[in-house]
Amino acid sequence: MKQTRILAALLISSFCIHVAAQQRNIDQKIDSILRLMTVDEKIGQLNLYAGRMNPTGPITMRENDEDEIRRGHVGMVFNIVGAKRTREIQRIAVEESRLKIPLLIGFDVVHGYRTIFPIPLGESASWDLDLMKRTAKASADEASAMGIHWTFAPMVDVCHDARWGRIMEGGGEDPYLVSLITKAKVEGYQGADLKEMGSVMACAKHFAAYGATIDGRDYNTADISDATLRNIYLPPFKAAVESGVSTLMAGYHELNGIPTSASSYLMTDILRNEWKFDGFVVSDWGSIRETATHGYAKDRKDAAMKSFNAGLDVDMESSAYISHLKELTSEGRVSLENIENSVRKVLRMKYLTGVMDNPYRYCNQQREDTIILKKEYLKLAREAACKSMVLLKNKNQVLPLSENLKSIAVIGPLADSKKDMSGSWSKSCDSKDMITLLEALTTQIGSTTKIKYEKGCDVQGDDRSGFAAAIKVASKSDVILVAMGESKELSGEASSRSDISLPGIQKELLKELKKLNRPIVLILFNGRPLSIPWEADNVDAILEAWFPGNEAGNALADVLFGRFNPQGKLTVSFPRSVGQVPIFYNHKNTGRPEGGGEKFFVTRYIDNSNQPLFPFGYGLSYTTFEYSEIKLEAPQLTYDGILHATVKVKNTGKYKGVETIQLYIRDLVASSTRPVKELKHFQKVELTPGEEKEVKFEIKEEDLRFWNNNKQYFSEPGKFQLFIGSDSESVKKAEFELL
Ligand code: BGC
């Protein structure tokens, strides 16, 4: 035993010596490059330009980008796709620029490159961290085969507001879960070593609290307390840094009066000084220039100075650094030493990714041709889509469907819409590759079951001319599958909605179908929680499919026919009405909570319930699970001890199923008030019918820490409630004390 420990210590120390030597070696190389560079070339390394092919922001008019690369005025590019084109752009940098420094090439690989996985909000509902790591790795593999070294993902903004279109890009409302997802994603994209074939640099964005913007309107203002920032919005970013993320992206929004792209509190005090982040920070598209529009900088030059001095290393699409930093150094308002420090960070990443040694390592047509849409990746996409789906309702066990049904009516604007299956942030995919619900049903059971399809209506608009045909088809079928929701443009960037119910006349059509008195299964495609109280009361089953990606139809068929038993659990609360938004499970108690003796003078709506329609953590299975009471090993937890809590979970239904068992705590009295529940742990357990398992959790003092108003991250002794259950509302309860 002792010998093994000595051997391990020797191995670790020789590894550390090796890493330190490698780092010294890189530093020396960077020093020699810096000695050769003009000031313009240094600033050029901090300049990131977008290609014009796939714009993800407003196109900026400027001189020829290729000439700018030749002049050494560009250090990195993005939105350039395909091995041929990335090779060509790289060739210009390494053959035609004076110092021949290769470019970093970026792209928003948010949920897949050509193989599209479910949108991140959907995938988060799987609560399967290993799966999320595997899909990130596969995305990185495909993207890198096209010459990409850097993805602008994961988006780690916690969000409580379903109106915000970008809620689809993140992992939901809970900081603990989003932090774990962030770690999985960073590890998946970056691999163990950035030099590994198929690894790309990750970028945690948008630093920070973009998900807290008021009104759910994109690009809007966030105004929150420091404690909320630290307890809710920063943990995923900290997790990204601790997982070795290479880059972070600042945001468009302002936080407490300062645009995040010029916030030294975020980028210097917290990120560099507290967290010791050593990668680089990139702006969002034009967000340096926009600090002037916010009213924080006088003009673009002032903006360049404020952002750079606040700690923002790289300028995406503002052309503010390349136009003004040199002048600002000669005026003594920006230090050349700081510019060199930022250049060091960029060059270091170029070494760590291997592009410095082999600029074309990722521009490989043959690899592109063989990797794209590999069978293995499509299989993974199907697994991810199945695991992301959430069964919201299943009255009288209408699902799973029997394969012996005589006829199925497939109705709705999203039943056969290839273009919508990928959801937002999927510019690199080809919608021809998507499999729709109708296609999958026709191929899989079309020879034995009559499948009749009518679209009925569009997602938006008021054209009712398709109603009659849809009703006719539906009236003659054993079951009606209705595919409705949002088209892919209705969520994502710049796609906030003030009404989050089913768009257009879809509900009207659903009401007509309801009159037929046949079982209705509503399959929802959407990028945000929808408010669907009527639908929840009136249809027989609801399956939340999000935007499932390439294998949409196949995965849906797997779930609908019970070849895959749904296991997804919501990572965002579904409101009853938009008026409840922002709604989230980990809210505070207030001085007048509901549920006591008083009925009127309590915190509540007079026209609606306080509770969401479907709470955080909720999702049904085709089987049922029964929970025992919680058994606590002891009533107290010591500061450095471990408290074990166990529950027995039994599969009481007819199908094998997977349950996600969730553990929440509540700190009853603290120096600043704590939420009524906070997720602290979860476990996924598979159970066959009749099987029972004991599930054991470990609670430690560190699980109970929070950022208090004295700006300290501490736990406080006292009483805690502990909850274990199948969602944030259906829980068993116990109590313990932290000594
Ligand atoms: C988005 C970023 C994205 C960037 C580049 C911006 O508009 O906010 O998340 O990475 O465009 O496409």
Image (tube, helix red, strand yellow):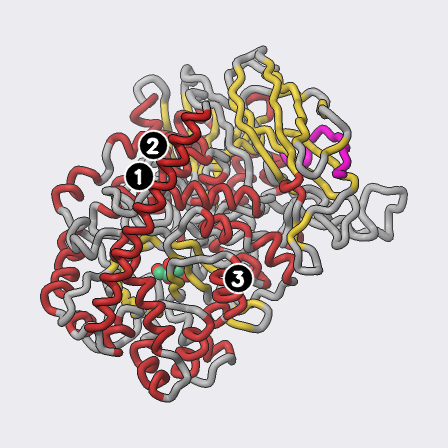
Seen at 34% across and 21% down, the residue is 445
Check disc 1: other Cα within 10 Å, few if <14, some if 14-19, many if 20+: many
| Circle 1 or circle 3, nearest the eye | 3
* Ligand 1 quarter of the rendering: bottom left
Q: Quadrant of the C terminus?
A: top right
Q: Residue at x 49, y 66 (%)?
A: 268
Mark closest to the chain's N terminus, 2 or 3 = 3
**As drawn, is 540 to the left or to the right of 242?**
right
Whether the residues at callouts 2 and 1 have beta carbons within 8 Å, the answer is yes
Q: Which mark is residue 138?
A: 1
Q: Quadrant of the N terminus?
A: top left
- The image position of residue 353, as x and y in percent, is 26, 52
- Three-letter code for the amino acid on which mark 3 is drawn: Ile
Instruction: Return the residue at label 3.
Output: 270
Which label is found at residue 380?
A: 2
* Residue kind at label 2, given as amino acid type: Leu
SS for tag 2? helix
Dot 3, crowdedness within 10 Å: few (<14), some or many (≥20)?
some
Q: CA distance from mark 2 to mark 1?
A: 9 Å
Q: For residue 663, what is the image quadrant?
A: top right
Question: Magenta residues, as a range?
Answer: 727-739
Looking at the picture, which amino acid does disc 1 mark?
Ala
Q: Earlier in the sequence, mark 1 or mark 3?
A: 1
Q: Check residue 17 for magenta coloring.
A: no
